[in-house]
Amino acid sequence: MNLTATSVNPTNSGSSCSAELSDLQRRSPISRELALRWVGCRDEDLPQLLAAARAAKENFKPGVITYSRKVFLPLTNLCRDYCGYCTFRRDPGQPGAHTMTPEEVLAVAHAGENLGCTEALFSLGDKPELLFPEMRDTLRHLGYKSTLHYLEAMCELVLRETKLLPHPNPGLLSAEWIARLAAVSPSMGLMLETVNPALLNPGAAHDNAPDKVPAKRLRTIEEAGKQGVPFTTGLLIGIGETPEDRVDTLLAIRDLHERYGHIQEVIVQNFRAKPGIPMASAPEPSVGEMLRTVAVARLLMPKVNIQAPPNLNAPYYEDLLDAGINDWGGISPLTPDYINPEKPWPHLGKLQLRTESKGFQLRQRLPVYPEFLPALTSRPGLLADRLEIAIDNRGLARQERAA
Ligand code: SF4
């Protein structure tokens, strides 16, 4: 590991963490106090923290790292929020502002199908029609009352017409909309990002982003739990939060998972500065902060899938594997990462080689993880039929494409 690049220590207390790390069994579940110490551990303790996290990963899912072969469907990039780090969103009339037509959705989905993709990731702005009359016109023209009605129809179209399985990421959802989208997609997602409401203050990352109120996001994730919907969430580091906020965000996710058992994946995503955004000159989190956060996520939730996006962390793939991830997330052989277009996804062959160099097999999964499949396939209907076709006997993608 490049310790020069990983040496920034956010909350170095100066005291050693190694005693607690050598005695993890007795300390489970990990307390907030311990997690805080580890997220700020000294550079000399970092190898031991990573070793403990990797051992926990191997105890959970030995020998294998997964990824989801996907197409990215930016259904609309209009959004009523103005997050300081976002390059995706547009106002109507801005260059690149676009709402996909059903024909465009199907064309991308079919192209992905031909390349062995099994996930249709729908990413979109949050409730743009509430702010923009242009979006209301677009929806009226398409024949839908709201962006969520349109999303539901497009998930159903993809499910019916292709072998892809939809995974929508539409922002805050009511109980009714969680139920409606769960009927046409095996899993869905909402990044919690942070539990710190101070980021909504003027000038902060979530200034003028009404859908980023942490309590509202927690309510959506909790409602998905009450309905037993396999749910992807995670935290975004480097947007003005403290190391303590990172731990508290992970603890909030752990708490929901302990109550409902529905968190299928926790993403640890790092802010990357890009030209043209309000946070263009904000500092990025260091590799060291990223690895500490991933390792603490793994140790706090030893039986939950932990993911970190490889394209935002190149070239530190091996370090992320050392920190305890067991998944690379969605990777597309076809469509760019519209959220971080300047950071291309790694070539899958290269990712496979580097994963194997650390002693792991790389396997293709579906958007829903294997352990959540039985509850879905036992409910008769189109979704269960599509899942049965897609899975192998381990619950991974049946027809894996060579990377
Ligand atoms: S991050 Fe999401 S909610 Fe925030 S502005 Fe971008 S699209 Fe909208």
Image: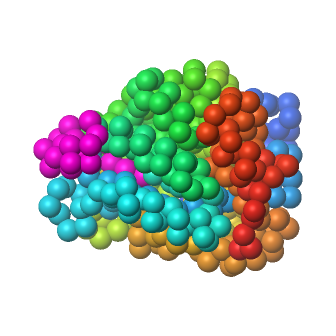
| Residue 192 at x, y percent in the picture | 47, 39
Give the vertical position of 196 relative to 3 (above or below): above
Q: Residue drawn 41% across and 26% down? A: 174
Stretch of the chain drawn in magenta = 123-145
Q: Residue drawn 43% across and 29% down? A: 177
Q: Is residue 125 magenta?
A: yes
| Residue 268 at x, y percent in the picture | 57, 51
Q: Is residue 332 visible?
A: no
Image quadrant in which the N terminus is located: bottom right
Task: From the viewer's side, name the closer residue of 256 and 176.
Answer: 176
Task: From the viewer's side, name the closer residue of 307 and 66.
Answer: 66
Q: Residue drawn 86% across and 58% down? A: 63
Q: Is residue 343 magenta?
A: no
Q: Is residue 136 visible?
A: yes
Task: From the viewer's side, name the closer residue of 363 and 265.
Answer: 363
Q: Residue drawn 20% across and 68% down? A: 95
| Residue 266 at x, y percent in the picture | 61, 44
Give the vertical position of 55 relative to 375 (above or below): below
Q: How many numbered marks appear?
A: 0
